[in-house]
Image (cartoon, grey):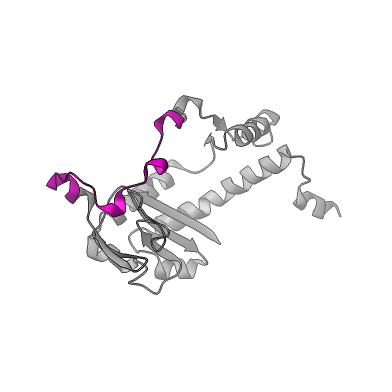
Amino acid sequence: MNYWSCSEPKWQARRCKIGSETKSSQAVDKVHHQFLKILPELFTQPIEKRLNMSKVLPDELIPVIDISDSEDPEVIKSVCDATDKLGLFQIVKHGVPLSIIEGVKDATHKFFGLSSEEKKKYLSQNTPLKNVRYVTSFSPEVDKAYEWKDHLSCFYVSDEETLELWPSICKHEALQYLKTCDSVIKTLIEILITGLGIPNLNHAHNES
């Protein structure tokens, strides 16, 4: 099952049940305009879980890797080294057209620009849908503090379900982006498999 998720730092007023206590969170823009001295409890992260900027990796230290020639030994080494030592890297010349990237970004902004009432249709308590989730927290029933951004998560099962159930304002762009990225994912997996010295299963099957 493929998965598409987007987020934006935009908060909506909603009621959330945590344990046996029901609390009403406030939109963060309201907090800003009301000049409140204390943040709503649901958005106050424990000190030990707050971002420590001293541990944030500077942009210039994140490897930028051109994967246009995925069979190049230097490319394979760069990807494997970055995966092993840092756990992250940026790729360029991956084959995903800029128009598709900009299209899904624009569609994402359009979704989050919808009215609160329209977006609330996709809250778990308001919809029977299992593969489309609009949440502030991925686990609102157990999280003690919410993230400072909303998420729209869509799980791909089939084109038919996507076109029927995903939000109409972004479903076409999201589906196109998801399908275009499939080849990129496969390329990265093949690079890692090669770098680890694991036989290519497709080649092994063809040779047998």
Nearest the eye: 80 or 36: 36
Farthest-out residue, right: 208
Count the marks: how many?
A: 0
Q: Residue at x 30, y 50 (%)?
A: 43
Q: Nearer the viewer, residue 56 or 179?
A: 56
In x, y percent, where is residue 9?
30, 47
Residues 51 and 65: in front is 51
The residue lying furthest to the left in this view is 34
Residue 187 at x, y = what percent? 63, 44
On screen, residue 134 versus residue 23, left or right, reads: right
Estimate the x, y position of residue 170 in percent, counting from the top left: 36, 58
Q: Residue at x 46, y 52 (%)?
A: 177
Q: Residue furthest bottom?
A: 128
Percent coordinates x, y for residue 63 in the rendering: 54, 29
Magenta highlight range? 30-56
Residue 112 placement: quadrant: bottom left
Asked whether 199 or 142 is in front, the reply is 142
Q: Is residue 92 visible?
A: no
Query: Is the residue 57 above or below the residue 21 in the image?
Result: above
**Residue depicted at x 38% and y 61%:** 140
Tell me the quarter of the image containing the N terminus: bottom right
Residue 38 horizontal side relative to residue 178, left or right: left
For the C terminus, give its image quadrant: bottom right
Task: Evaluate whether residue 120 shows in this view.
Answer: yes
Vertical relation: 102 (above or below) 139: above
Which residue lies at the image location 40% right of the left edge and 57% below the top edge?
A: 143
| Residue 41 highlighted magenta (yes or no) | yes
Q: Is residue 77 magenta?
A: no
